[in-house]
Image (cartoon, helix red, strand yellow):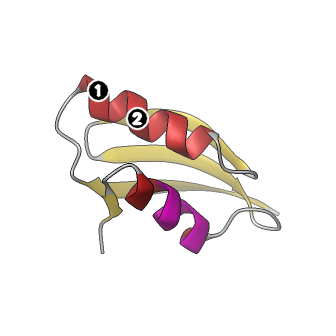
């Protein structure tokens, strides 16, 4: 099943952040990046391959975090 989600992301302040988050999300199996703006990412998720935990870990590795 594929779902579309808007993720709120803490720590983004500039175009470099947007690029870093886009690349981090694009590197996750099952995540298709639709759009990334400062503080927000719109993604389509393949629920059988992508997990919130995997997304959070990839963002954390780049210095960002999913907002609560």
Percent across and percent down for residue 1 are 83, 63
Circle 2 Cα neighbour tier, 10 Å, few/some/many (<14 / 14–19 / ≥20): some
- Residue topped by disc 2: 20
Residue 16: mark: 1
- For residue 19, what is the image quadrant? top left
Q: Give the spatial CA distance, label 2 vs label 1.
A: 6 Å
Place of residue 24 in the rendered image (x, y in percent of width and height, measured from the top left): 52, 43
* Horizontal relation, residue 51 to residue 16: left or right: right
User: Is residue 19 on the magenta stretch?
Assistant: no
Give left or right: position of 43 versus 15.
right
Q: Are marks 2 and 1 in contact (CB under 8 Å)?
A: yes
**x then y, percent, for residue 22:** 48, 35
Q: Main secondary structure of the magenta part?
A: helix
Q: Which residue corresponds to the image point at 61% horizontal and 39% vertical from the top-left?
A: 26
Please tell me whether residue 39 is drawn above or below residue 68 in the rendered image: above
- Residue furthest out toward the left: 13
Which residue occupies 31% across, 55% down? 64
> Could you say whether the residue bearing mark 2 is in a helix, strand or loop?
helix
* Left or right relative to 28: residue 10: left
Is the C terminus in the top left, top right, bottom left or bottom right quadrant? bottom left
The magenta span reads 53-58
Q: Residue 3: where, in percent of width, then height?
A: 68, 59
Left or right of 52 in this view: 14? left
**Circle number at residue 45:** none
The count of marks equals: 2
Foreground: 47 or 20? Answer: 20
């Amino acid at each position: 099943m594929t779902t579309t989600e808007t993720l709120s992301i803490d720590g983004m302040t500039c175009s470099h952040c947007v690029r870093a988050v886009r690349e981090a999300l694009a590197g996750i199996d099952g995540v298709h990046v639709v759009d990334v703006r400062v503080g927000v990412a719109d993604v389509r998720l393949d629920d059988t391959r992508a997990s919130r935990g995997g997304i959070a870990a990839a963002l954390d590795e780049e210095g960002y975090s999913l907002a609560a």
